[in-house]
Image (cartoon, rainbow, N blue to C red):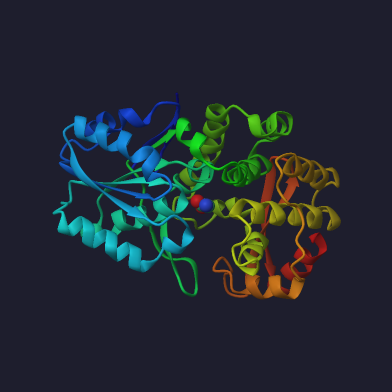
Amino acid sequence: MKTVRVPVSDPYDVLIGPGLLPSLGDKVRSLCPKAARYVLVTDDNVGPCWAEVCTRSLQAAGLAGDVYTLPHGEASKTAGSLIEILNFAADRRMTRSDLFVALGGGMVGDLTGLASATFMRGVSYVQLPTSLLAAVDSSVGGKTAVDLPAGKNLMGAFWQPKLVLCDTDALSTLPPADFVSGCAEVIKMSVLFDEALFERLAGEGVDFDREAVIARSVALKRDVVAQDERDTGRRALLNLGHTLGHAVEACSDYALSHGQCVAIGMAAVCRAAAKYGFCSPDVPERVVTVLERFGLPTRTHIPFPALMDRMLSDKKRSGGAIGVVVPEAIGSCSVRPMDTRTAGAFMKAGL
Ligand code: GLY
């Protein structure tokens, strides 16, 4: 097992390794000694595989509770679901010393995190990520949210978990396409911060050592979050490939996975950066080779004007400027503020 400590305002551990879920109850007991109840939120894909081992462990540690199961998929990440979860917890007389447990991927984690941030003005929660994307990205860093009709993650709060337990056994029930989608975020972290991790991924492909690679990727994210808990500076680097990626995601009507869209966005930004002389031409060549090795796409047929329209409505735009994350080398990137016209021309150059 590996442990990554996240030193934010209320520090917590991310534990990564096989066979961790059966120890959930003991860990909750020592972190939340006054807790008597839990509400475990999950979805109808993950719950049948992993909820019982969690509830058994919580009950063995003396906690009573209930399971709230959502239909899987992003369509459940709504304000309506949030209210239902809050009512569910209130009806079961959950108190301020009790906790939520998020068992699932990013949708469950983001939604349960926001329920925890808002129930009685804030209660504890534990993240149990069961997708690679959630393990390396959304479960760490305290970003919680639901989607609004106008866009993704428009209603949310920063609210850090008490603990993240990443049981690598749970990733074994993940469909292969979802695992590969999560790999795009790991590749992204390596392009941003760690050439050795990049080379490891290039060499090992999807068969990488999960415990070691997830722990390294989480540690890289930890370093960013520790410096910029509230996403006002350095954390923007984590958007590498996301400005174009979000546009591809929306224009494809979410037919492509988040990881596939990030892969397309990352490849485009690397090609554009080389054309503009921000990095050497071997950067896009190496990044595209690794993405292809993982079976991730690197091009889109979506016409540029449609992508540009979506980019202009991205919430990460600030005033007239877009912070475009640009590689300078593998393992080193910077945020370049560009006006929308310059950003558009830059992205187009990479398509
Ligand atoms: N997913 C990007 C962040 O946590 O800031």
Tell me the quarter of the picture where residue 48 sits.
top left
Residue at 29% in and 65% down: 83
Q: Nearer the viewer, residue 223 or 296?
A: 296
Tell me the quarter of the picture where residue 111 sits.
bottom left
Residue at 41% in and 61% down: 76
Residue at 43% in and 47% down: 45
Is residue 75 at least partly visible in the picture? yes
Q: Position of residue 75 (x, y in %)?
A: 46, 63
Q: Position of residue 145 (x, y in %)?
A: 41, 60
From the viewer's perspective, is 252 left or right of 285? left
Q: Position of residue 173 (x, y in %)?
A: 49, 37
From the viewer's perspective, is 252 left or right of 316? right
If the image is split into quadrants, where does the C terminus sit? Answer: bottom right
Examine the rendered structure and indicate whether residue 22 appears above or below residue 234.
Answer: above
Residue at 75% in and 64% down: 347
Examine the rendered structure and indicate whether residue 24 appears above or below residue 241.
Answer: above
Q: Nearer the viewer, residue 45 or 315?
A: 45
Q: Position of residue 337 (x, y in %)?
A: 66, 64
Tell me the quarter of the picture where residue 93 sits.
bottom left
Examine the rendered structure and indicate whether residue 80 appears above or below residue 279.
Answer: below
> Of all residues shown, which one is farthest toward the front?
48
